[in-house]
Amino acid sequence: QEPTSIHVEERALVKALGSGHFFNSVVMVEGVGGEAVRTLAKDVAFHPVTDRPLHVDLFRVGEHSTVTVAVPVVFVDEDKSPGLT
């Protein structure tokens, strides 16, 4: 499909970026005509001085598509867990 321009509220985008899993989450975008489209975030461009988000690249994902994403794993109290050594 052809690329489509959408508007995203900056406050909502900053909140989603701060969640820590924005790039690993499906974002539902309501298209023209009320049609919901599944998307995944691909990239975010930030202002070089203020670090405010300027642009987000999303790509469409089919309902039964297989997608590979990197999921960060953070170990808490790693030194106290003998199973992680």
Image (spheres, rainbow, N blue to C red):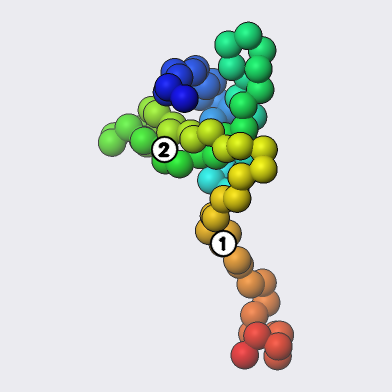
Q: Residue furthest left?
A: 48
Where in the figure is residue 60, as x and y percent of width and height?
53, 33
Is residue 19 in sight in this rendering?
no
Circles 2, 1 touching at the beta carbon (< 8 Å)? no
Residue 64 versus residue 68: which sits nearer the camera?
Answer: 64
- Decide if residue 71 is on the left or right side of residue 77: left
Count of number-bearing discs: 2
Where in the figure is residue 38, as x and y percent of width and height?
62, 32
Q: Tell me the CA gap for discs 2 and 1.
A: 18 Å
Task: Name the residue located 66 percent from the left edge and 22 percent from the top edge.
Answer: 36
In terms of sequence position, does the residue under pointer 2 or pointer 1 come before the other? Answer: 2
Compared with 72, 27 (above or below) is above
Quarter of image, res 78: bottom right
Task: Name the residue located 53 percent from the left edge and 46 percent from the top edge.
Answer: 23
Is residue 42 in sight in this rendering?
yes
Q: Residue furthest top?
A: 33
Task: Name the residue located 62 percent from the left edge and 26 percent from the top edge.
Answer: 37
| Circle 1: element type | loop
Residue 76 versus residue 72: which sits nearer the camera?
Answer: 72
Numbered circle sitting on residue 44: 2
Where in the figure is residue 61, as x and y percent of width and height?
57, 37
Compared with 18, 55 (above or below) is above
Quarter of image, res 31: top right
Numbered circle sitting on residue 2: none
Quarter of image, res 72: bottom right
**Residue type indicated by callout 1:** Pro
Instruction: Provide the residue designation for mark 1.
Output: 72
| Circle 2: element type | strand
Residue 53 versus residue 49: which sits nearer the camera?
Answer: 53
**Residue type indicated by callout 2:** Val
